[in-house]
Amino acid sequence: MRLNESLHYLDNAATTMVDPQVAQAIHQAMLARWANPSSLYDPAVESQLSLETARARVAKTLNCRSDEVYFTACGSESNNMAVWGAALPRRDWGDKIVVSGFEHPSVQRPIRALRDFGFTVVEILPERDGTLSTEKFLAAVDKRTVLAACMAVNNETGAVQDIAALAAGVKKKNSRTHFHVDAVQAWLRMPIDLKQWKGVDTLSLSGHKVHAPKGIGALFLCDNQRQTLRPPYLGGHQERGLRPGTENVPYAAGLGVAAQNGAKTLKSRQNHMAALNRRLREGLAELDGITVHSPQNAVAEVVNFSTGCVNSQTFINYLSTRQIYVSGGSACDKGEPSHTLMAMGLDDTAVRTALRVSFCADNTEADVDALLAGLRDGLNELQHI
């Protein structure tokens, strides 16, 4: 997939390059599966079959039923559909929402907006190491809790949460509480088994994090919650009435190929990423003043650290001149200070000098070495805070 060996792209948590196999599947579907899948003639049936094949491929990666997968435009839309769709219909019996303090903005902001509708929102802040206390989270759930939400893998630190324990605990405290999981950064980076994560009611996915294009995502909706989730849009019957509008068959087909390929290579990619992660951490340990914020049990794809002396954007710009591309945190925060690191209780200097490195299977040891050399030179050349 890699086209330019001199380019060191290390921001895969922001977006990934489209896999040529995925692009080919999309191209073929655009030419051969052009008919509206809701129509009743033969070309439309072929489009519908392509859509359902993609749905089955996504479902297989989650160990759920195909009819529990709904195609959306992105992970942010999936999150909004789950948050608004679950909370508002439950106002007749509850008014409380429990959520982690380091959610993606597409979960955090809708939930905070629900305060205007009279909901009480309790945010459980992460511990200093970036992990979430399952006990503290569950302690906040009560008989008035309509919605609980926690991301499976934090998009800035890679911290992995115990979703199985959270899901089981939420349902034990209140079986009517809807439990939503943002799995955008977890999907195809770690195994997801919704038979094991029993109690998860909705779960969001995004295509452009897994080498599919921007503009396609999915939402898992547990079948027993289908009648309790209020669709945010009104229109036709597409996606079983949950998301009206003519389906994007080509992009769904591409997402299906990405899902199939990602599941097939999961173990080998995990091993490869773990080796790159170790190499990076060992190199960072040799640089003065570097503090790593990603816990040891984080997904191997993400390493978040602070230089403690050079502003994040200054270092990003410096590395870019060497064709080394990293970020200061979530792309959706558009340069704002990391709310995740602030929620972890880090001081202002650590937050303002933080960098996030995120790998994919195409990255190599040469990428890590180029980054470490760039960091070493930058620490010597750049103006310190």
Image: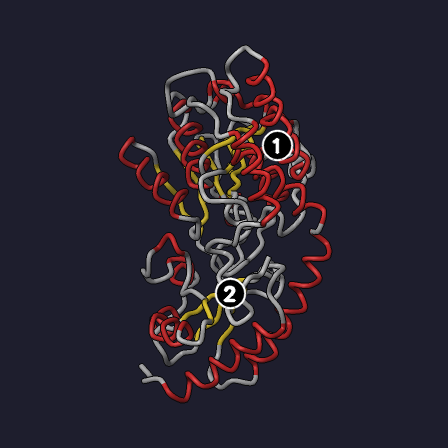
**Percent x, y of residue 247:** 48, 26
Query: Helix or strand or loop: what does disc 2 sit on?
Result: loop
Q: Is residue 186 above or below residue 254?
A: below
- Residue 10: numbered disc: 2
Using the rendered view, name the quadrant where residue 85 is placed: top left
Q: How is this picture coloured? A: secondary structure
* x 63%, y 75%: residue: 279
Residue lying at the far front of the rendered structure: 31
Q: Are marks 2 and 1 in contact (CB under 8 Å)?
A: no
How dense is the environment of label 1, judged by Cα within 10 Å: few (below 14), some, or many (20 and up)?
A: many
- Residue 54: numbered disc: 1
Q: Amino acid at mark 1?
A: Ala
Residue lying at the far bottom of the rendered structure: 380
Q: From the image, which quarter does the C terminus lie in?
A: bottom left
Residue lying at the far left of the rendered structure: 116
**Percent x, y of residue 221:** 55, 29
